[in-house]
Image: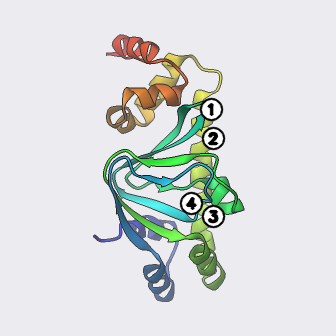
Amino acid sequence: MPNPLFQIITQLGPISPELELHLNEKILHKSFPKRHIILHQGEVCNYLYFVAKGLLRAYYERNGEDTSNWFMMENDFVISVNSFYKRIPSAESIEVLEDCELFCIHYNDLMEIYERHKEFNVIGRKLTEMYYCKSEERIQSLRGHQAAEKYEFLLLNYPEIVHRVSVGYLASYLGITLQTLSRIRGIMR
């Protein structure tokens, strides 16, 4: 499978032939089936993933119930941020919701590339800024809003997620019951 990751990173900054060669040596292609857990809560996240095909969710378990944190699909990066960068056990699990084709790089390899190829630091910074802004936007959409407003935000900004993710996972993400989500969906049709 061609690596679509290069289409994304070359839009963020120039890549020297040496950097491209080094990235090609370190980036792995992996396939995962639906329901596979690529990271279990309590493990250290060693890989940064890029989704070429498929859908995943991040979630945490508390008192025997799981709560969805976010959903990642094609052209998204998948990572348990604190675990990956701080090298600590993850507070969340990451599950494959659809068969996935992922490109990934190990933490040690990424740090080596940052050290050896200074131009890659610009790309890393731009990606970090982009995902930090997305995270802030997501938090703001959930904080202090009514259930219908939260659902409407998803529908307007991430319609594919609404159509690809089960209603149970959506309700969990929005912090509402299945009945409330069903009522909201009925009103918005």
Q: Amino acid at mark 1?
A: Gln
Callout 3 amino acid = Arg
Residue type highlighted by circle 4: Leu
How far from the left and from the top, in percent, is residue 86? 71, 60
Location of residue 146 by image quarter: top right
| Residue 184 vertical position relative to residue 154 in the rendered view, above or below | above
Tag 2 and tag 1, C-beta contact below 8 Å: yes
Which residue in the protein does label 2 denote?
136
Residue 127 image offset from top left, x and y in percent: 56, 60
Label 1: element kind: helix
| Vertical placement of residue 132 versus 112, above or below | above
Q: Looking at the rendering, in which quadrant would you find the C terminus?
A: top left
The reply to whether dot 2 and dot 3 touch (C-beta < 8 Å) is no
Q: Is residue 133 left or right of residue 166?
A: right
Lower position in the chain sequence, tag 2 or tag 4: 4
Q: Choose between 68 and 158: the one closer to the eye.
A: 68
> In front: 30, or 150?
30
